[in-house]
Image (cartoon, grey):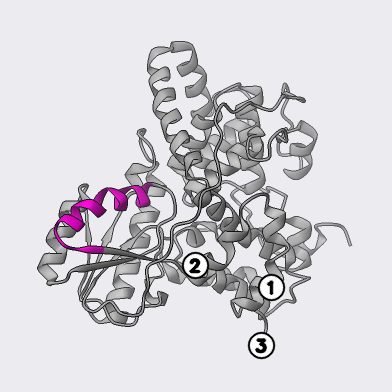
Amino acid sequence: MTQLSFLDDQPKETVSWTGARGPALDRLNVFLPRVGRAYASSRNFDFGPENRTNISCLSPWIRHRLILEEEVVRETLARHSLPSAEKFIQEVFWRAYFKGWLEQRPSVWSRYRLDIDQLIDQLDRSSDVRACYEQATGGKTGIDCFDDWAVELVETGYLHNHARMWFASIWIFTLRLPWQLGADFFYRHLLDGDPASNTLSWRWVAGLHTKGKNYIARSSNIEKYTQGRFSPKGLVDDALSLVEEFEHPLQPMHQSSACDDYGSFGLVVTEEDCGVETLPLSEKPSGICGLLATQRRSPLPIGEPAQIFATNALDDTLERAGRHFECPACRSKAEDWASFLVDWAQSLGVKKIVTAWAPVGPVRAKLDEARPVLESANISLAQIMRPYDQACWPHAKRGFFKLREKIPNLIKELGLNRV
């Protein structure tokens, strides 16, 4: 049997990403039979958007927690042993690793946002840099694979993980564009755009996450893993790692709010966690509201597919949560979260607002901006961290290996193993 012969009898499979929990569960059930040896041997191949048979494509739903990481692991282990599903389960835990790592080094995110503002200003001042940037983002570099991926990203909001690595490497080392602008391009368009996974993946390719170890896209590798669809010429075969001027010291993580006695409270849903029915709440909320921070991903325009997915995810969540908690639920378009939340809490007659934990990123920033205004109105804001995050994130202080070796114990601790 050849490496990919098991796919011969599989029909080509496209994926339609709809921001709702139902399609997430449907996709999980379709993919679960392939999680074992089939996935391990084929996951690095990018067959193109017309055939996603070999990969899960679950990341947009997991990113918004329309389906939870622990849910995916539990369902996987209900059908497969840990050794046979190891590669896939490790991919699920990579997201926890990146989130935990950035949570403990938030200055990486702050520095990145400052860099983006400065680099966008540079685009306005330098016609040469802007021309190169626009060729790259417009898919007009003349590098066939890169150009195809740029168009695919903008049109669909998705790229195969291997293609993301190749794209980032070509952006940084062949086109010599700042990695931050590439990360921003991805973050603006990806359905699964995530502050931690996206920023740290780009830093890894650049040689900044694991210092001195960058990722070089090679034509032979691209040709092999796209099955000859692409064979680009002129790629840089060797490149020095970039040097970072700033240190990002490890910081203690913030603590989750206690969740045993809230009394009357309002529940806020954001795009960071659309699984609020499973939050450990002791009481039902008096009301639910949804707030979006998608536009805060970048000073530049956000891709339409990413906006639509996040909006639909929030609307689906509000509809489900309203039924589950049997209380009114609505989505607000307010840009000023602080003023809206004060008025909303007062309309409910509550002095406490509860929300799922928002990791480092735009949602966290919006909540941090709102907190002092809420406090001045005698309204408290509580963020609830999930047990999965509490268990995983402390192991994300250095490289992924430290978390990876803990996966069997974490599975037992969280009760995700086969029963």
Q: Which mark is residue 409?
A: 1
Q: Position of residue 354 (x, y in %)?
A: 30, 67
Please state the total of marks drawn on the protein image.
Answer: 3
For the residues labelled 3 and 2, the Cα–Cα distance comes to 23 Å
Q: Residue at x 18, y 69 (%)?
A: 351
**N-terminal of the two: label 1 or label 3?**
1
Q: Quadrant of residue 150?
A: top right
Instruction: Say which of marks 3 and 2 sits in front.
Output: 3
The numbered disc on residue 226 is none
Query: What's the residue type where badge 3 is placed?
Result: Val
Q: Tell me, yes or no, whether the two marked residues, 3 and 2, touch with CB atoms within 8 Å.
A: no
Residue lying furthest right: 1
Q: Which of these two is toward me, 188 or 5?
A: 188
Q: Which residue is mark 3?
A: 419
Q: At numbered mark 1, what does the secondary structure look like: helix, strand or loop? A: helix
Q: Left or right: 373 with respect to 196?
A: left
The single residue placed furthest to the bottom in the displayed view is: 419
Q: Position of residue 378 (x, y in %)?
A: 16, 62
Q: Which residue is mark 2?
A: 24
Sequence-first tag of 3 and 2: 2
The answer to which of 9 and 409 lies nearer the viewer is: 409
Q: In the rendered view, does 269 fall on the left or right side of 336?
A: right
Between 383 and 363, the residue placed more toward the observer is 383
Range of magenta residues? 362-380
Q: Is residue 370 magenta?
A: yes
Name the amino acid type tagged 1.
Answer: Asn
Quadrant of res 77: bottom right
Q: Amino acid at mark 2?
A: Ala
Q: Say whether marks 1 and 2 touch (CB < 8 Å).
A: no
The quadrant of the rendering that contains the C terminus is: bottom right
Q: Residue at x 68, y 47 (%)?
A: 46
Q: Residues within 10 Å of mark 2 (few under 14, many from 20)?
A: many
